Amino acid sequence: MLPRRDLLAGSRHPEALSAVLDGAEAALRTWEPQWTEYLGGAVREEAEQRLRTLADLQFEGTGGYPGAERQRLLLWRRETDLDPATMAVPLIGLQLAGNFLFDPAEPEDLRDALLQLGVPACHCGDLWLRGDRGGEGVVAAEAAAVLEGVQTAVRSVTVQLATCPLTALQPPQRRQARHFHTVEASTRLDAVASAGFGLSRSRMANLIRAGQVRVNWQPVSSPSRELIEGERVQLSGRGELRIEAVAPTKRDRFRISLLRC
């Protein structure tokens, strides 16, 4: 049996982590590999950190493409010498075709549409936009039967859904980690994130108010939220910013060192 009390102590996501531990226990008990459901970035990081303390367990995450934020973990007993590359990945691609020229959408709009169709959140991986022609994403293979050939609405746009192999997708390119500096009048979230992600400040403020920006994986709705050294800012589909250093300048501004990854 796993030391569940110790593994769950202080968890910020005890229910989700408990489900991962159920899979870990099954993998250790039955000697059969187990897949978790889709885990968001915050839950996945916490689960991986705690699973590393288990000497008998190995794990590997996959989200359907390199750099995916939402992933499923494959859990297996170390003594089995399992090669993860030989395991069938229970994921499938999803294409959402529609004309968003006059009503631009965000990834969260695509996710909301899938949830309204009855797809559980734990079956939804990353979703991204393909300009104004629609979007793509990755879902659990279990969701394929529900989504194939379905027509639905995303915002005011009629969208046709079709499943496809993962190799047919054109996911966001994985960014190389890049260090850079910016000088800002304040350490406000909208100012720093605007410079870091290369979006206008007004667009970033709107994304923050819509709950699409997170700090240390926690949703934030206030553009004026001040950032400090060591904090991390996540924006779906655009990666993460890490605040490496903040130093005042002689002109009462702030020189901020960022890592975008």
Image: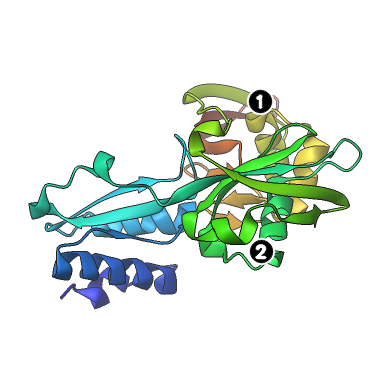
Horizontal arrangement in the rendering, residue 251 relative to residue 24 (left or right)? right
> Hey, what amino acid is under mark 1?
Val
Horizontal arrangement in the rendering, residue 27 relative to residue 9 (left or right)? left
The spot of residue 47 in percent (x, y) is 34, 59
What residue occupies the far right of the structure in this picture?
Answer: 102
Q: Residue at x 73, y 31 (%)?
A: 199
Viewer-nearest residue: 137 or 25: 137
Q: Is 69 rendered above or below residue 181?
A: below
Horizontal arrangement in the rendering, residue 195 relative to residue 154 (left or right)? left
Disc 2/disc 1 C-alpha distance (Å): 41 Å
Dividing the picture into quadrants, the one containing residue 173 is top right
Q: Is 25 rendered above or below residue 43?
A: below
- Which residue was labeled with disc 1? 183
Q: Nearer the viewer, mark 2 or mark 1?
A: 2
Q: Residue at x 84, y 38 (%)?
A: 99
Q: Is residue 253 visible?
A: no
Q: Secondary structure at mark 2?
A: helix
The spot of residue 94 in percent (x, y) is 60, 45
Colouring of the image: rainbow
Q: Tag 1 or tag 2, which sits nearer the N-term? A: 2
Q: Is residue 122 visible?
A: yes
Q: Is 24 rendered above or below residue 49?
A: below
Q: Residue at x 20, y 56 (%)?
A: 76
The spot of residue 65 in percent (x, y) is 47, 37
Marking on residue 115: 2
> Hey, what amino acid is under mark 2?
Leu
Q: Secondary structure at mark 1?
A: strand
Viewer-nearest residue: 99 or 184: 99
Dividing the picture into quadrants, the one containing residue 113 is bottom right
Quarter of the image containing the N terminus? bottom left
